[in-house]
Image: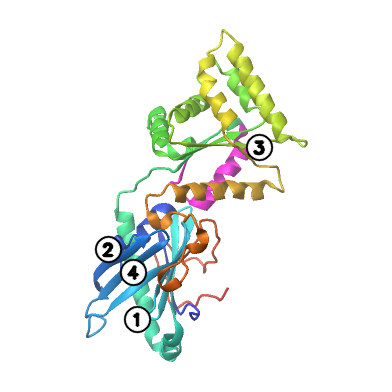
Amino acid sequence: MPTDSVFTGSIIVNRPIMEVFDYARDPNKIYEWHPFHSKLEEVERGENILSFEITYSRLISPLTPTFRVDLTEMVLGRRLVYRCLKGGVVFTIDFEPSSRGTVIYSSMSLWSWQAVLLEFTVPLSRPFFNDWIAQSLANFKRNAEGKDSKNDAFVFYSYRREAMYTGGRIYDALLQEFGEGFVFRDIDSISGGSQWQMRIEEALKKCKIVIAHIDDDWEGVIKDKINEVDVLREELNTTLLYKDKIFIPVFTSHQQNFVMGNRLAKIHETLNDISSDVNSEAAKINHIKEALKNTQGLLLRRDPDFRQDCQKLLETVWAIRRETSADPTLRPRSRPDAAEGRAGRPMRVDPSRRVTRPPRPRSPGDASSARRRPSP
């Protein structure tokens, strides 16, 4: 087992958390921010497997040592853990979303006999390794922020402004979990002077998930505006034209005796009434009717159950994010119990697990040093 984290650092990167996470876990990008190495080659990549060999320059040694590094744990969007068995080091990177972008915490632990051997030299080596971590984080921040932001939201959030209180709580939960840039909501994602219709169409084309918040009088407003311009209706109609989008209806209610079956029956009854009205533009809701009929929705109950139900929504989004990734290291295996790394060591890949992180950095862009991470 490794020792406590003896070398640590942290920094704030002004980029969305998933963009930062994807950049950090790409071994082909390590050369851009990891100091002192002269060569890096990927050895193995597959389902839940990622290994590479890194050769260090003569700046840190008279020789040019080469080490194999294995990714032993990955919490999607939250944590990466690398282990170098030969060097006796475990390197952990934790990610946390914030209003300013992404907070990164990194730590280095010593492994097995190397930990015992170097325990006596830690006070002497601490300045070097803390400076190493600080330099790595500074390079990472500079390169990550210098790249063109993808700025493509993974989730499109559809809501009625009349239901802003509950709808806002859902959006806040998504924002807290995934950070800025991951979720598109018109009032937050469209800047002044932009053509809002064009921005909404672009976001719908690029997103993968569309979450539609359906409150108590959702279908009633659709009926009242059936012969008017209704942005929400047009959003959903546009969404449902794309077969590759995942549509997630999310139901909320302020009624004390709420029954999901009765609620769905009322929605279908109202939409059928609209279809039977020859004076209305009934074709505008045909796609919506079919989608609600054939798609499993999620119910977010009132407090005190709201937070628990909202967690199910977040876990669903994490699962879709992982399943739709083109990177095989993120794909779940058909037999989870067979997910093993090199030499029988399991690599844990958990998209929903929470991780414990050390305190935030004192100021943006300032890497902290000489901080010992508390034991869990």
Q: Residue 128 carries which label?
A: 1
Q: Which mark is residue 252?
A: 3
Give the alpha-carbon distance from disc 3 to disc 2, as whole Å.
46 Å
Q: Which of marks 3 and 2 is nearer the N terminus?
A: 2
Over which residues does the magenta segment extend? 163-184
Asked whether the residues under the numbered discs 1 and 4 touch, taking CB atoms below 8 Å apart as contact, a structural biologist would say no
Instruction: Find numbered disc 4 in the image and state the secondary structure of the residue it sits on.
Output: helix
Q: Which mark is residue 136?
A: 4
Looking at the image, is 187 positioned above or below residue 8? Answer: above
Three-letter amino acid code at disc 4? Ser
Identity of the residue drawn at 69% across and 30% down:
263
Three-letter amino acid code at disc 2? Glu
* Camera-side mark, 3 or 4: 3
Residue 161: say if magenta: no
Identity of the residue drawn at 30% across and 59% down:
143
Task: Label the magenta part by its dominant secondary structure.
Answer: helix
Residue 257 coordinates in the image, percent (x, y)? 78, 36
Within 10 angstroms of label 1, few (less than 14), some, or many (20 or more) residues? few
Give the alpha-carbon distance from disc 1 to disc 4, as whole Å.
12 Å
Looking at the image, is 367 positioned above or below residue 246? Answer: below
Residue 22 coordinates in the image, percent (x, y)? 38, 56
